[in-house]
Amino acid sequence: MRELGSRAKGLATRVWGGEHRWLVILLAAYALARVVVLAGGAVFTSYDTFSYVHRGDPFYDRGPVVSFTGHAPRLWGVPLFYALFPSDAWRAAGQWALGTIAWATLAWVVWSLLRDTAARVVAVAGILLVALLDFVSNLDFAILSESLTVSLGVLVLAMLLRWLATGGRAALVIMAVAGFWWTFTRPDTRVLVGFVLLVLAAVAWRAPHRRKAAVAAGAVLLVGVGWCSVIAPVTQEEFKHWGAVDADQHEELWLYRLRKDILPRPDAKAVFVERFGMPACPGAERSAQRAEWDIVEFANEYRQCPDLVAWGEANRDDIFTRFALQAPGPYLAMTYDLTSWSLSGGTYGPVRSVLPGFVHRVAYPGPPWTVPFTLALIVVAVVAAVVGGAFRQRRLIVWTSVVTMAACLVSVVATVVTAGGQVWRFGIQESLGIRIAAILMVAAALDSLRRRRRPPADATPSAAPNGDQAPASA
């Protein structure tokens, strides 16, 4: 018993002693703030909720919501998670717990990779501030896919960084399991998982001593991507029995894009009418101009115009490709606007805010500033990393951030040009990924700059071969 007490005291001394106390303080403040959020949060459900979890109503419960072969309206990742809990309140609490753990884990991993106390505090404080934004916190109370997608993505990034830095088997296993489940939360997640596969392939090629581990983890993720790709068409067809407009996801996507992306935009509509011969449909056009978004009404009006229905069935598969090729100006204007909304953030329901309002406005200024703000954020972060020497001294953090930014940009553009509907929901994980990467790059730059300016007597041991010093345990 005395030995156990001595060990506990020693552990407490190591954790609280020196600079690590700042990590403890920041995580404690974050945990307290998250408890405040949980206490003040209200569960939010939407029409889509019943396609993720049964509602106990025959009108909504139209069949199984969990199917590993695609015979359900959604991929199984979110419905299986929800099946673990008895009620929406417990599901929200489960999402809150997973999110709290994921963001705290990322903060801890980043702390362990940096050396300078100021840089560590900047990085961890920045990450935890992002995690406490209303935009992030409210996702945990929405019985939809966004919370699980974001939390698993953050956990994958944290564990990938940890494994790249230490080679620890536990980090790789957690990353592979989280990444596998992440693949089945939303179809577009496959783009981001694809970048993780590229990182693992690069490690396998350049680090022979880690090749087996990288190949094993890559195989797990590759199986997930293949499995998801095989069952996705089945899920899209099954969705026809669950959607609001009695259509499979392919047809519903066309209705959303026509309703939101084409008819309300005079330049885009003119191209569709004058170049592609789209027939008129006064009822659908009036519905598309209304402020409220009633897709059911629009679908009904659309189906009362047989010429437009026939034209849509004949053209919808390649119409947007032709739009891009034949009218690049209006197409790029539409894509820019949709990208801006996709990266703008948003909230579902009320949540207790724990940060001042200006923090939210600075982090997410909203359209029309979204795209310029995002690009400026990336440029500032890269310039800071170059000037601070982080590309030489903190290569692991910086290059992981570069890959994260690239993955998020590719994913959001791919989603915008292929999907339709509530576009602000589509770029949630990508907009967060860009902000995380920018914080990491700035912190790495600060870490490198401050370490270079310290007197030689205060210098730490030489850097590891990859340009990062061996991480200390936190």
Image (cartoon, grey):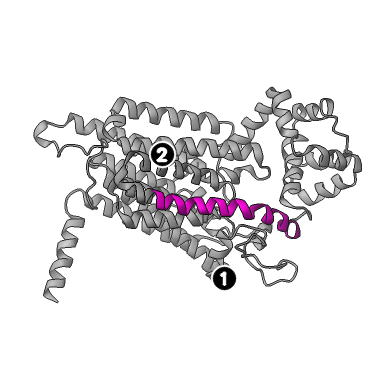
Q: Is residue 84 left or right of residue 356?
A: right
Q: Main secondary structure of the magenta part?
A: helix
Labels 1, 2: front one: 2
For badge 2, the amino acid type reads: Ala
Q: Position of residue 345 (x, y in %)?
A: 55, 43
Query: Which residue appears farthest toward the bottom when viewing the image?
Result: 1
Classify residue 178 by image quadrant. Answer: bottom left
Q: Is residue 35 left or right of residue 5?
A: right
The residue at the point 58 percent across, 63 percent down is 79
For the record, the magenta segment spans 215-242
Q: Position of residue 35 (x, y in %)?
A: 42, 61
Magenta-colored stretch includes residue 233: yes
For badge 1, the amino acid type reads: Ser
Magenta-colored stretch includes residue 318: no
Q: Is residue 20 above or below residue 310?
A: below
Query: Which residue appears farthest toward the left when viewing the image?
Result: 457
Q: Position of residue 54 (x, y in %)?
A: 65, 68
Q: Is residue 227 left or right of residue 422?
A: left
Along the viewing direction, whichever of 440 and 135 lies nearer the viewer: 440
Mark 1 residue element: loop
Residue designated by label 1: 87
